[in-house]
Amino acid sequence: MATSAFLDFTKATETSTVNEQHFAGLRAGEATTDRITGIDISLAFLPLAAPISDAKVLTGRQKPLTEIAFLFAEIRTESGLSGVGYGYSKRAGGPGLFAHAKEIAPELLGEDPSDIQRLWTKLVWAGASMGRSGLSTQAIAAMDIALWDLKAKRAGLPLAKLLGAHRDSVQCYNTSGGYLSMSIEEVLANAKASVEHGIGGIKIKVGQPDTSVDIKRVRAVREALGDNFHMMVDANQQWNRSTAIRMGRKLEEFELTWIEEPLDAYDAEGHAALARELATPIATGEMLTSAAEHRALIKAGSVDFMQPDAPRVGGITPFLKIMALGEDAGIRMAPHFAMEIHLHLSAAYEIDPWVEHFEWLEPLFNEKLEIAGGRMIVPNRPGLGFSLSEQARAWTTDRVGFGSNS
């Protein structure tokens, strides 16, 4: 037995020495295992079945929404792997995103795709004269998300698992069925269909010029859903402080899960006052375009539910910073839109979050997300778990490629 133990020890020592010799051959700065060889950037427009309106349209600040622009990035490497990511714009901005992304995308060629944080910074500084938030970083988002998709695929893991998941499914709520352009009969029918589909919460838009109309619509939906079903409302930044506090108090009888964007997105002080005064939680943040802006919102005590949007803040890399800020402050999270991306990020968030469901996005991808028991299930496919459909290709209006096409 002593001889056997000695031989095992000798074998283990030899294996360790071989491994040390192998890794010793990699000098500092030469740990690259793959290189980016090709990048495709494309712009597609998803048409909506019917124009939709929220409070921003009723106040005359915007026109009804008829289509959504999507910026797609597809990144290939010399090992044969590929990653896909997207950003988007509602109303104006899509062609601008495409133009900026087209200028800076070649900066990624030849780089190690795993160095995502460094590459995000490189892309930011490539267009720094345009600023380090807003359109310039939203154009980066599609590439950053594609790199995270690629990194998770290399590991053979869903992105949520790569980040370290707290759960395999996330509470989900539907928004697309509750717009102000829809009659209350349509809203109720849409809510019923969502519940039957397994959705766990319903959000409807508010912000009518006549606030009594809002109360009637909220009451009708609450009565249809029952007292214990999760329900949210969204004013899309169109109330002033006095209207917000009055409406907030009137809405308390409905025991809402949250009131979303009651004030201008940058009114941190006003949101903080509402959060202190009202029993109903306050949610906001979807319109912010950087981690720094979210830090200010959290520091002011303005939110009970923060609502970052990965494509709007510049991708997953800055989104992870926002997650860390939120977890440190003990704030719940309900990311805006982009459910294919936010499902994974929400699954990796420590405090039980929500994810927003929009069936509008389903034609863009070959895979569909599964919903059951009020929750959206994290797919077990590597990466983000989606690929672009032929319909997405058909809706593409502009496309440019760099590097190898193979």
Image: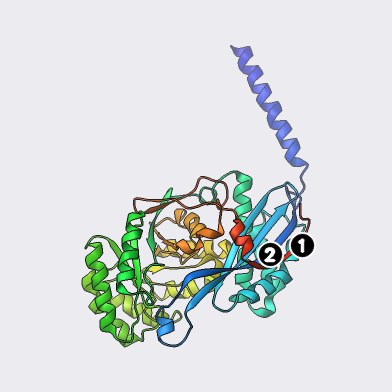
| Marks 1 and 2, how far apart at CA | 9 Å
Q: Quadrant of the N terminus?
A: top right
Q: Which residue is mark 1?
A: 402
Q: Is residue 258 visible?
A: no
Q: Position of residue 322 (x, y in %)?
A: 50, 65
Residue 64: image x %, image y %?
47, 79
Q: Residue at x 48, y 83 (%)?
A: 63
Left or right for 401, reference 132: right
Residue under label 2: 41
Q: Position of residue 351 (x, y in %)?
A: 39, 57
Disc 1 residue type (three-letter):
Phe
Q: For label 1, count other residues whose C-alpha is less than 10 Å away and answer few (under 14), some (14-19) or many (20+).
A: some
First of labels 1, 2 by sequence position: 2
Lateral position of residue 195 relative to residue 34, left or right: left
Q: Is residue 259 left or right of residue 57?
A: left
Confirm or deny contact between disc 1 and disc 2 (CB under 8 A).
yes
Q: Residue at x 42, y 79 (%)?
A: 268
Q: Residues within 10 Å of mark 2 (few under 14, many from 20)?
A: many
Question: Horizontally, is 21 left or right of 121 in the view?
Answer: right
- Report the amino acid beneath label 2: Ile
**Residue 292 visible in the snapshot:** yes
Q: Secondary structure at mark 1?
A: strand
